[in-house]
């Protein structure tokens, strides 16, 4: 970017940011969208984060080789115009879009794609230390990436991998500028550069992240001049800001506030079913939950129907197992949720010799898809104590919470709240239920659940070419995990958002991302 152009852009951005100093943002430029997020982002490096809260920003700043078709989890071309797959399912060859440049002015090409995946997967890569890369599991089957020419890139896989194209559309597969990584190193997450519809402008900690329109976006410049993402952890504060005009969009509206917005013509409420699971991770390595009967007892002890109807006010359904019903083709409809049966819970605890040890329960103040976590945690605590399981709650801010839970619960807690929104029925169990996904091996199996048969089923399912065969394997996996009860299965949520009536083109997606490229304000 030429110095004069850069200075003009900086002046425009500075002027816009000055307009955001009013408590109610009364002077917000009419064509800037203000989004109320549930937490501060951890990083703006798409390969370094795991939370949908962060992804909602990143999908507007970066593109992947593929992307999800609007309203679906089916993939379509993005930075790759087309691709070929070898007969054995182990070689993918992508033809890239020409004329695309990163926001820093450097060219997008096959070498840039190779840089991205080598950075994640090759420990000897000179910029591997710009990580960590917690979801590199998505691409663990990639053996080699080769730039065949400037606009052709080849991926060699160690085995057929059915979710590969879908995972390329997930934020972990978003393509970052090698030039920016080389310039900023470990600080790249604060100086992001992609090819997306919006360019990074500013990040003020605990205040806002601002992105501005990419006039040269390959898929057409967006209508919005800018998007301002404001982290507002407290739900009541987000609601007050929405009502006062400080926000144009609010995500994850508490259930008891939805009616208020529905009844007000100045707002629009949107809801969308997606692949979501809210659950409690149980520490199966040590303490009471090393015993399967005690894990089952917890599932019987908690009145999940009451949680869904009273706390969540009907915005979710009781979960039966580890796979959300939104994955209709892979969901095991023969599984029933654990019934609310406190007498059965007490019987199992007695049979297991439970000694009344106090449980430590990690709860978060709020985070991606966490469904009123404090109220949910308090209700669960009451149900457990009613069957003779004293429970101590420890509550943490979202990023602090992740810092405690993701490295594993051993030596710290007996259980922890968690929520996942995923793109494929492989994702959640592969990253959280396999033996090879223990935290010390780079995964998110924070409760240390291990079952050899589950490991085998998941490995076979991700290599199967037939969706029918994958479905059989996933359904068998669900039956085993349901019985083993490594989690307290609680709820599958219907996501929501509120927009001001003058916001046009906003649609929730089953991916749970906020795609703002076509949104406008009137």
Image: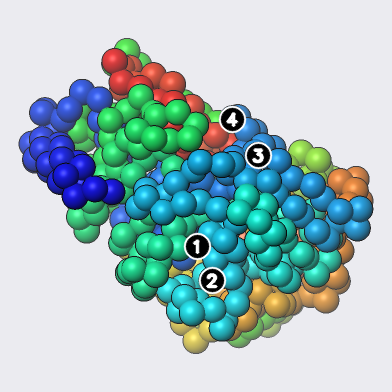
The reply to whether the C-beta atoms of the residues labelled 1 and 3 are less than 8 Å apart is no
Residue 126 x %, y %: 49, 79
User: How many discs appear?
Assistant: 4
Mark 1 closeness class: few <14, some 14–19, many ≥20 residues within 10 Å:
many
The residue identified by callout 4 is 70
Task: Measure the C-alpha gap from mark 4 to mark 2.
Answer: 30 Å
Residue situated in front as seen by the camera: 488 or 507 = 507
Task: Measure the C-alpha gap from mark 1 to mark 2.
Answer: 10 Å
Position of residue 23 in the picture relative to residue 330 (left or right): left
Task: Measure the C-alpha gap from mark 1 to mark 3.
Answer: 22 Å
The residue identified by callout 3 is 81
Give the mark, 4 or 2, whose residue is nearer the N terminus: 4
Query: Is 8 drawn above or below residue 208 in the view shown?
Result: above
Residue 175 x %, y %: 51, 54
State the residue at coordinates (59%, 30%): 70
Residue 18 visible in the displayed image: yes
Query: Is 479 drawn above or below residue 232 in the view shown?
Result: below
State the residue at coordinates (19%, 50%): 3
> On the rendered image, what quadrant is the C terminus found in?
top left
Colour mapping: rainbow
The reply to whether the C-beta atoms of the residues labelled 4 and 2 are less than 8 Å apart is no
Task: Measure the C-alpha gap from mark 4 to mark 3.
Answer: 17 Å
The reply to whether the C-beta atoms of the residues labelled 4 and 3 are less than 8 Å apart is no
Query: Is 77 drawn above or below residue 209 in the view shown?
Result: above
């Amino acid at each position: 970017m030429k110095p004069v152009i850069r200075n003009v852009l900086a002046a425009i951005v500075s002027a816009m940011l000055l307009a955001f100093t009013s408590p109610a943002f009364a002077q917000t430029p009419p064509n800037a969208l203000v989004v109320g997020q549930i937490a501060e982002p951890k990083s703006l490096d798409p390969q370094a984060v795991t939370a949908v809260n962060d992804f909602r920003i990143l999908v507007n700043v970066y593109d992947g080789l593929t992307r999800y078709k609007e309203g679906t989890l089916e993939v379509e071309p993005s930075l790759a115009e087309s691709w070929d797959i070898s007969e054995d399912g182990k070689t993918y060859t992508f033809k890239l879009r020409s004329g695309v440049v990163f926001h820093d002015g450097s060219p997008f090409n096959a070498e840039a794609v190779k840089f991205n995946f080598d950075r994640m997967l090759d420990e000897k890569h000179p910029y591997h230390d710009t990580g960590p890369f917690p979801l590199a599991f998505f691409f663990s089957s990639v053996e080699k990436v080769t730039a065949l020419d400037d606009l052709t890139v080849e991926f060699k896989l160690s085995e057929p991998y059915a979710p590969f194209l879908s995972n390329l559309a997930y934020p972990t597969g978003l393509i970052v500028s090698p030039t920016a990584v080389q310039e900023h190193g470990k600080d790249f997450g604060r100086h992001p550069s992609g090819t997306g519809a919006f360019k990074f402008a500013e990040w003020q900690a605990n205040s806002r992240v601002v992105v501005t329109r990419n006039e040269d976006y390959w898929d057409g410049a967006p209508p919005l001049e800018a998007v301002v993402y404001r982290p507002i952890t407290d739900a009541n504060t987000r609601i007050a800001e929405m009502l006062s005009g400080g926000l144009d969009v609010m995500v994850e509206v508490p259930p008891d506030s939805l009616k208020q917005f529905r009844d007000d013509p100045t707002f629009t409420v949107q809801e969308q079913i997606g692949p979501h699971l809210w659950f409690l991770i149980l520490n199966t390595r040590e303490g009471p939950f090393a015993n399967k009967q005690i894990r089952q007892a917890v599932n019987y002890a908690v009145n999940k129907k009451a949680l869904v109807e009273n706390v969540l006010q009907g915005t979710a359904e009781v979960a039966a197992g580890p796979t959300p019903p939104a994955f209709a083709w892979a969901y095991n409809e023969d599984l029933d949720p654990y019934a609310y049966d406190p007498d059965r819970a007490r019987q199992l605890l007695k049979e297991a010799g439970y000694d009344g040890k106090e449980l430590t329960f990690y709860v978060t103040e709020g985070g991606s898809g966490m469904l009123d976590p404090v109220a949910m945690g308090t209700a669960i605590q009451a149900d457990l104590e009613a069957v003779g399981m004293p429970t101590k709650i420890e509550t943490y801010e979202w990023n602090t919470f992740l810092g405690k839970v993701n490295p594993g619960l051993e030596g710290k807690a007996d259980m922890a709240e968690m929520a996942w929104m995923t793109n494929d029925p492989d994702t959640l169990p592969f990253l959280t239920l396999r033996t090879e996904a223990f935290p010390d091996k780079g995964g998110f199996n924070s409760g240390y659940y291990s079952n050899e048969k589950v490991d085998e089923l998941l490995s076979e399912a991700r290599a199967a070419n037939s969706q029918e065969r994958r479905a059989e394997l996933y359904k068998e996996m669900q039956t085993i995990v349901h019985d083993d009860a490594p989690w307290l299965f609680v709820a599958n949520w219907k996501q929501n958002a509120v927009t001001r009536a003058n916001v046009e083109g906003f649609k929730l997606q089953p991916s749970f991302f906020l795609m703002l490229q076509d949104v406008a304000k009137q």
